[in-house]
Image (cartoon, grey):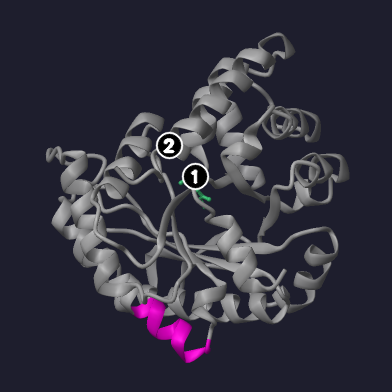
Amino acid sequence: MDLIEIAHQLVAPSKGILAADESLPTIKKRFDKIGIKSTPVTRHSWRELLFSTREIEKYISGVILFEETLQDKSLVDLLLNKNIIVGIKVDAGKKSMPTSKNEVITEGLNDLKERLPKYKKLGAQFTKWRAVYTIAEGLPSHEAIYENANLLGRFAILSQEAGMVPIVEPEVLMDGSHDISTCAKVTERVLKVVFEELGNYKVNLKGMLLKPNMVLPGEDSAEKASPQKIAKETARVMSATVPKEVSGLVFLSGGQSADEATKHLSAINALGGTPPWELSFSFGRALQSTAMKIWKGDPKNLKFAQEEFLKRCRLNSEARFKR
Ligand code: 13P
């Protein structure tokens, strides 16, 4: 498949992406919450539970893996046997910015060109790079916006040159007490610069996907925005910044509850009109967290956890229907 075909299949109607690419520190945080130790065995068991869930291929087009999982042939084969497209997180996490101590930039570009063919050999057809932006007094800084956008541009073109669809993920975090209009302004500014850089690196927009945050009030904000307001603001910002050639928008859940993320995706698709892109999901926590709480590391709970996981996959698939 060429890049455009892969991108289209990832956002095929009624399907979305499962992000199961938690790094070692992140999966540890998730497992700490359910009181289990993160080891190669527990990580394998959890991911096996997810990927072996019957009929997920009805709702899931692709799964983003962490490198450890891509090297685990039995897990990769579970996905390939269901015709689910395999992807890989290729960034190496965040580090403090020398010029702005309270902000981070994403690492991993130095050896990326050498790593990409290895991932392709292991079965990956798409890649993901996440940049994060903090909203606070005077933040995100000009430097954080430009440096992260530049890294996203370089990542995206290297990935396309290696024959894999890049998922470009600039995430404006929901941490903080800002209101929805601040999130809208920051997201608009961030995306504008991201697409300038993608243009500078001549990234083929049809052969990539954008993974944006939804436009929301901060987690600690007193403001409560309705799903319709969130959908409208999100659609307005995307229309103002995302070129029509991009094959699809696959929203991240970013710490919203599973129900909220689904409700908001549904409201975005219910806005109607004829947006130029598919409006889909690439959720991590919103697909996994409720099932993980049921599982708790105990094989006895496997069946119930899988039922819950399948339900979340189905509900998000349904949230893609235009009403
Ligand atoms: P969340 O949906 O939990 O935000 O995860 C998506 C993701 O891939 C973060 O990089």
The quarter in which the N terminus is drawn is bottom right
User: Label 2 to label 1, Cα distance in Å?
Assistant: 7 Å
Residue drawn 52% across the image and 88% down it: 201
Q: Is residue 299 left or right of residue 320?
A: right
Q: Residues within 10 Å of mark 1 (few under 14, many from 20)?
A: some
Q: Position of residue 23 (x, y in %)?
A: 64, 48
Look at mark 2 in the image and give the residue it sits on: 318
Q: What is the crowding at mark 2: few (fewer than 14 residues within 10 Å), some, or many (at least 20)?
A: some
Q: Which secondary structure dominates the residues rendered in magenta? A: helix
- Contact between labelled residues 1 and 2, with CB atoms less than 8 Å apart: yes
Q: Residue 62 in the image: x percent, y percent?
A: 63, 50
| Residue 298: mark in rendering | none
Q: How many marks?
A: 2
Is 296 placed above or below 131 here?
above
In-front residue for pair 59/90: 59
Residue for point 54% across, 32% down: 288
Q: Residue at x 75, y 43 (%)?
A: 79
Q: Earlier in the sequence, mark 2 or mark 1?
A: 1
Q: Secondary structure at mark 1?
A: loop
Give the residue pinned by disc 1: 14
Tell whether circle 2 marks a residue whose Cβ is less than 8 angstroms from ligand 1. Answer: no
Residue 137 appears anywhere in the view: no
* Left or right of 267 on screen, residue 224: left
Between 156 and 250, the one lying in front of the other is 250
Which region shows up in magenta?
A: 193-202
Q: Is residue 314 above or below residue 72?
A: above
Three-letter residue code for mark 2: Glu
Q: Measuring 25% from the left and 53% from the top, which residue is drawn there? A: 272
- Compared with residue 246, is residue 177 higher up or lower down, i.e. above or below? above
Reply above or below: 321 against 95.
above
